[in-house]
Amino acid sequence: MRKNIYSFILLIVVPFSVVKLQAQHVVLISIDGLRPDFYLDDSWPAPNLRQLMKQGTYARHMRSVFPSYTYPSHTAMLTGALPARSGIYYNVPVGSKGEWNWFTRDIKVPTLWRTIKAAGMTTAAIEWPVSVDPNITYNIPEIWDPKDPEDRITEVRKYATPGLIEEIESKATGKLDGYSMNEAFFSMDAHAGMMAAYIFRTYKPHLLAVHFAGVDGQEHNMGREGDSVRLAVAAADRAVGEVLEAIERSGMKDSCTVLIVGDHGFSDLRFVMRPNILIKGIEASFVAAGGSAFLYVKKQGAQRQAVIQNVKARLDSLPIAYRSMFRIIDRKELDILGADSNAVLALAAFPGLVFSGAVTSNPASTGPGTTLRQGGIDGIFGAVKGGHHGYDPRIPEMYTGFIAAGAHVNKGKEIPDLCVTDIAPLLARLLHLSFSAPDGQLPQGVLRDE
């Protein structure tokens, strides 16, 4: 495998002392697909994460949103809002031709980006989902050409802060291209770490948010336990070390808080279901989101109810071996979960099953970092390998991780859990901002002033 050449990656472990000072800077590091076992289990190559865990506060797990997807969960961190209120229901807009939810203008609630700017403070974002936003002071957003989704720099240049990428290339990373910033290689996280380190050292933003995507890509391809997943974790941890070293060298360690967050967990896959084939002929369609699928119906009133009943009847007609792989979530439960406001119901798979929106039994692409090798079983079900997310966030396999260390954080403390929506109130408290988070609460036990 081409990625084995990275097995020699050096793992930087940077001590991060905790001093009782008011936080003036926050560094928010997202590791896409971060699972709590990466720092709770010593067998995973993550010494920087474990060092932060010991010197700060960590959670046994953090809950995602429904569906447990990257873009809605990252939006929740910067808004404190579940998808029903943020309007970012999935990674891609419904009806997308290949574009994703890249622009913050599509978020329906206030963001911390805008609030921080209004307070006269500075921000930075590197490869952060849903971050094409003029309110971000130093911005290298996550966006790509749908025709070449693995290239994570060419399209970015059109939306980044003018001159910033060229400055970083000159002083930190060297020339970046579709090879060095490629979703398929570990070097992308390494370069994102160097970008974040340079921006923090040079500009010292009040909030810096950086997203490392490599672990997610390998878990999609190989499942939870593949060798390349371990290499990706090592690469992400090494990139974390790059940022921690920059904080140390900048002299800002005693006034900086570091938050390590994930967005979702992962499930190993065995089967794929194509529910749109099952309901062919009914005026309705499912939007697939990994371990969940959301039903859209255009009819209203009594006609809508008739369509819903017909769909449920088709689902319940499946042989028990297949029907037992998922459950139906009604609108009332979707409201509790804060999910897509336009769906009339959803299917929630149990780990091992993933949904496809395909209307034929041909393989269907589900986006960058995902490889589904599908075969037909009655056209509706097929075999699949790899890993996925998007499941009910209350399922343990979907749990993600959280670590906080540095200024204002309790040392050596464990908390049971929190939700991604709680990150926004935590950021607001650390930066002493007034911010209303629709669904988030300040997590108890993290900060020393509680």
Image: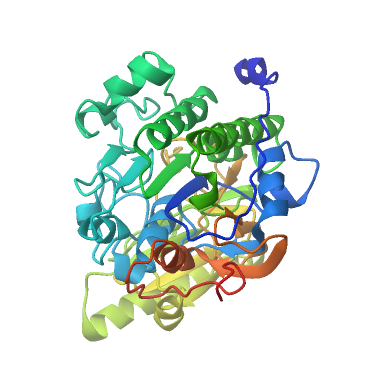
Residue 428 placed where, x, y %?
Answer: 39, 65
Residue 269 placed where, x, y %?
Answer: 63, 47
Residue placed furthest toward the bottom: 302
Residue 346 or residue 15, whichever sits in front: 15
Q: Is residue 134 above or below residue 239?
A: below
Rendered-image quadrant of the C terminus:
bottom right
Q: Is residue 447 above or below residue 269?
A: below
Residue 244 or residue 326, whichever sits in front: 244
Residue 402 placed where, x, y %?
Answer: 59, 57
Name the residue: 22% across, 25% down.
163
Rendered-image quadrant of the N terminus:
top right
Q: Quadrant of residue 224?
A: top right
Left or right for 258, reference 3: left
Left or right for 75, reference 117: right
Name the residue: 21% across, 79% down.
300
Left or right for 134, reference 176: left
Residue 432 placed where, x, y %?
Answer: 38, 66
Total numbered circles: 0
Can residue 440 be seen in the rendering of this structure? yes
Residue 209 or residue 236, whichever sits in front: 209
Name the residue: 25% across, 52% down.
104
Q: Is residue 119 above or below residue 242?
A: below
Residue 22 or residue 321, whichever sits in front: 22
Q: Quadrant of residue 310?
A: bottom left
Can residue 394 be seen in the rendering of this structure? no
Q: Is residue 388 above or below residue 188?
A: below
